[in-house]
Amino acid sequence: MPQIQVNEDDLKKKLTPEQYHILREKGTEAPFTSQLLNAHDGMFACAVCGQQLFASDAKFESGTGWPSFDKALPGAVEMRRDADHGMERTEVVCSNCGSHLGHVFEDGPPPTGLRYCMNSASLTFTPVPNPRPSGSLAVEVGGVPLHRRERRWGGMLDA
């Protein structure tokens, strides 16, 4: 259940029409149009409320055309049954404001086996300000450690 109430009129002013459609009307952006497909070394947050949702160490290249993650930050998202469009899916929403982020599927890489398939228009990205040199300890964004790793899934490389 969302923690905050969102004023829809204010959101229509803050967000682009595409973002509003995706975040508040459960829309989907076209595949391979994402500005965040190649975003690495940082933190992904909700475009409505700013809650941190995914660390870049959970991101992998799924080949689907949408940013994909194998896990969300603890307590950051909620799952809802979605039977729209004649399909049975699991919708992913921000636990803080209830905004639509995308869907989760059980065809992701080990160890979770999950693929959080997110709309980039529903996310903001904050890069790591000063990445440490290779071989050093992980950096942190908002107190969450980030570890850059290569992620292969479906024969593709995400580095």
Image (cartoon, rainbow, N blue to C red):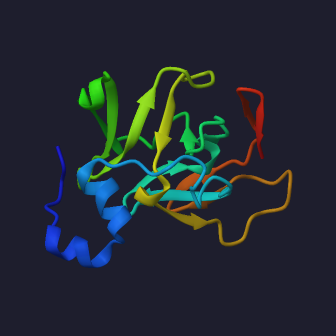
The answer to whether residue 91 of the structure is visible from this angle is: yes
**Residue 127 position (above or below residue 69):** below
Q: Position of residue 71 (x, y in %)?
A: 50, 35
**Residue 6 position (above or below residue 57):** below
Q: Position of residue 140 (x, y in %)?
A: 60, 59
Q: Position of residue 99 (x, y in %)?
A: 27, 52
Viewed as shown, does residue 56 lie left or right of 50? Answer: right
Residue drawn at the location 40% of the way across and 48% of the way down: 28
Total marks drawn?
Answer: 0
Query: Which residue is outermost to the bottom?
Result: 13
Check the picture and name the quadrant holding the N terminus: top left
**Nearest to the observer: residue 75 or residue 156:** 156
**Nearest to the observer: residue 55 or residue 88:** 88
Quarter of the figure with residue 85: top left
**Residue 128 position (above or below residue 105):** below
Residue drawn at the location 77% of the way across and 28% of the way down: 155
The answer to whether residue 48 of the structure is visible from this angle is: no
Viewed as shown, does residue 27 lie left or right of 25? Answer: right
**Nearest to the observer: residue 152 or residue 72:** 152
Viewed as shown, does residue 101 lie left or right of 56? Answer: left
Query: Which residue is outermost to the right?
Result: 134
